[in-house]
Amino acid sequence: MANVVPVEEYTREWYPGYKPEHFDFPYVVDAPSPFKPGDENAFWFLDFHWSRGLTPLAATLWSADGYCAGTQSASENLPLPPGRGVTCRFAGTHLYGSPIPEEDPREIGARANRLGTNLPHFLQNYRSIWEAGRDELEATWDYFQGIDLASVPTSDLGTLIRQGRRYHKRAMEIHFAVMYPMLVNFLGFYGSCAEMGIDTSLVGKFLQGEETKIMELDRELYALATKARQAGLSQVFADNEPGDMRAALSAHGGPASQWLTDFDDWLQVWGHRTDATCDVGVPSWIEDNTNAFGNIKTFLMKDTDHDFAAAARNALEERDAAIDAARSGLTREEQAVFDGGLAANQAANFPWWQDDHNYYIDLKVMLPLRQACQELATRVGADHRDDMLYLFWPELLQVADGEPYAGELSALVRDRRQYFDHWHGKRSEMPKVLGTVPDSVEDPVLIEIFGINPGSLRAVQNPDAANETTLTGVAAARGTATGIARVLQSSDELHRVAPGEILVCESTSPNWTPAFGKIAGAVCDGGGMLSHAAIVGREYGVPTVTAVGVATLAIGDGDKIEVDGTNGRVTILKRAAELVDTEPGQS
Amino acid sequence: MQNVVWVDAVEPDEAVPAAGSKIGRLADLHRTGVEVPQGFAVTVDAYRRHCGDAGLDPQIDAVLARLGAEPSEADVEAASAEIRELFVATPMTDALAAEITDAYEELCVRCVDVNVPTAVRSSATGEDAADASFAGIFDTYLGVSGAPRVLDAIRACWGSLFTGRALAYRLRKGISHHDMPIAVGVIELIHARASGVAFSVHPVTGKPDRVVIETSWGWGEAIVQGVVDPDHIEVGKADGRVLRYDVAHKAIVSAFDFADGRVTEVEMPARLADRKVLDDEQIGAVVSAVTAIEEHYGYPVDVEWVISRHRRAGDDICIVQSRPVTVTAEESTPAAYDPVALAQKYVFSGKPVPGR
């Protein structure tokens, strides 16, 4: 036994006038919270990553460990000279972000010098830095995978829950520490290309065609659909809704039973993914098969299989042709700069990483914590397996550490479910921006990832946005397409999208990628040149316009629209109501 | 002092003082082996002598004296018109006219032509900066043929020293017109198939790694005056590779009007308007001429050049004018990819990345 020296004597008083809130330090630069008086002096944008809304646990974990710890510490460390990362506030269940400006000129200068040291070091060591981070996370993932939750003593669940949170927090440190310097390198190359007179819509092409883990996942999913087609199950998929598919296939028997076995084997390899970004409130595909079945159902609606090999070949050929065309217009001196920039960006390929890392981080990083919370809910006899997700972190620890989950706390959870549902229903009415809206922003993450630019800032402040029939945005992926708009609030509805339709949403995340194998075009409220939709749109050759600001407001579900991804324009050709009257054959 | 100096014979140290900067530099180019047209200059001294002998000096001074220190724009224009009319109305002395006529006839012999068409060009004196400020302000007459017309064109060029803009400039700077007399070149008019300008650096960005060429059919006046949208070509200096060739719709052409006896701007024939003007061999010839001239002077230049109807592949192209290039921005191409410098410039400058 260790000897205990009591501290009690020193706990009663401190300096005259001391209050506990004197030590209420912000997390790194600024801590997350609900909106506070004075927040109207800053600029806040509705973050498209969490269009469902966030449960109390999801809200505190993501905002504190992801947004604030992740972006703010990466901004301090790289650093980003003009910005200090992103902070956030909640309006109901909905998350708003805000860039934290750095205004002290001396500090900006000091940061610029620090960047001069840190960026080259990162670029020289990019591969080992990212791989070390990835391997560390995979090792932690394997640790959680090796645990049989059912046999863990209840008294150990608190430890597991704490470990789950630290896993996520560490993942976010690695995520942003890699993402920010890669983004900066990419944008420098982009600017350099623009200066040399290269058509900047080609810059994304220079870096396309590299296989990512997410593409592999999508290909494997498609292979399952092909298997279903070959087994003669297309009609079963056509006749049933995704939620009833397992029962329907079981009832069908024969080849369907074998297919289901294959499907379950497949899930064990590829099903550790959520249809969300770092959201503890969302199940994996193993826990809930609906979206897996839904994707396969819609894949089978296409007459022909998506030819992944041909698409990959095309992407590579297109890349090489774009590089040759760009180089031929450069002087020998410029070619040296271009070749250097291309090599640096191919080695540390931002668009590639933007997709690839999601497999290792965003799509699964919350699952160990979620599963531990569900196990805890079972042990304490909660009404629902996901009751614990409606607790705030200190409340969760109390339950995990043995306080009874009953009475007041479980009543609170019931109320909070109602609160969540209430705000979930208000998502489409949430203002896209709050506070003091600028004409433009400087933070490259906001511009390139979130798509906050002067055009989108004007669009979201247009009081007549809902009646506009011509919308503009970032020309994210080239080409034009005309089709029926499918307006989705979240990826929960992805199974509603039929082949040849045009996806309209706040923004896409990696879990939306399978949809790009079947849609004709994509339109997003948010997202810049380097957003998921832009990158995947280019990989799949799907005309895409991002940063429209008000697409989900102006475009109605079922409207006939044209997407011009070359010029960044979206036109509403016919409203859904008119289509019903004039073109009864169309859906 | 001589009234006439020949482009191919004037002494190096006399070329610019006697023939003005435009024709002086042409003589300079000739000496270094650049292909230039035949011709002579009516010197600065000839101009001075004319002003003295014909009694123009006191008349000009009288007009200028009336202007005062801060005249209105209208007053300046009126004085300009009055002085230019004096030049038109005042004939040369017989001796000077005879000497110039004799030189013109010698030019005809050299060109194996009777009444050879010429370009009569003002060639101002003064520093390069002043030269640049006066670019295009003094008169040039293209296609002047026959001694009497040449003499008239020379007097008109003299008078152009007193355009409203030139007068206003000198008043503002406190310069006397006596301090910047003018010479006039009488130069064989090359029968142009195509012509244009060429810069030994990018004229807008100042990038020194390329030659920029603008060209159209016929004579170069339409390009210089900006009335035609020319073909735009950029060539890498290091390896002579054509980086871009933008074919423009060329709606106007400077062509020789035989009835009128001069080069004039007319509508471009439809079949030529959208046709590519230069082939690779011709581009190469323009590039080697402009880079040789830049190397000779040791500073960036812009040149006017002509491809004569009779030029064959492998021949030099003809340079009709050269001067130091006036670039506003000066930007050198970085030697290597520098991610930190680019990050500072594009990501952290608070300015949007170009092309977004």
Image (cartoon, coloured by chain):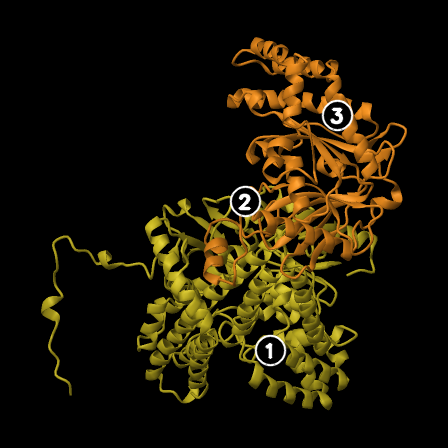
Q: Residues within 10 Å of mark 2 (few under 14, many from 20)?
A: few
Q: Is residue A51 above or below residue B108?
A: below
Q: Which chain is orange?
A: B
Label 3, secondary structure: give it.
helix
Q: Quadrant of residue B48?
A: top right
- State left or right for residue B243 relative to residue A462: right
Label 2 sits on what residue type?
Ala
Find residue A247 and report its horizontal and vertical position in percent: 66, 82
Q: The disc numbered 1 marks a residue on which chain?
A: A
Q: Which mark is residue A289?
A: 1
Q: Is B231 in front, or is B180?
A: B180
Q: Is residue B175 left or right of residue B249?
A: left
Q: Label 3: which residue?
A: B99
Closest to the camera, between mark 1 and mark 3, is 3
Helix, strand or loop at mark 2: loop
**Label 1 element class:** loop
Would residue A559 be seen by someone viewing this image from the given angle?
no
Q: Residue furthest left?
A: A9
Badge 1 amino acid:
Asn
- Residue A435: percent from the left, percent from the top? 45, 46
**Residue drawn at x 66%, y 53% as measured from the top left:** A568
Same chain, marks 3 and 2? yes
Is the N terminus of chain A in the top left, top right, bottom left or bottom right quadrant? Answer: bottom left
Disc 2 marks which residue?
Answer: B329
Contact between labelled residues 1 and 2, with CB atoms less than 8 Å apart? no
Q: Colour of chain A?
A: yellow
Q: Position of residue A328 (x, y in %)?
A: 68, 62
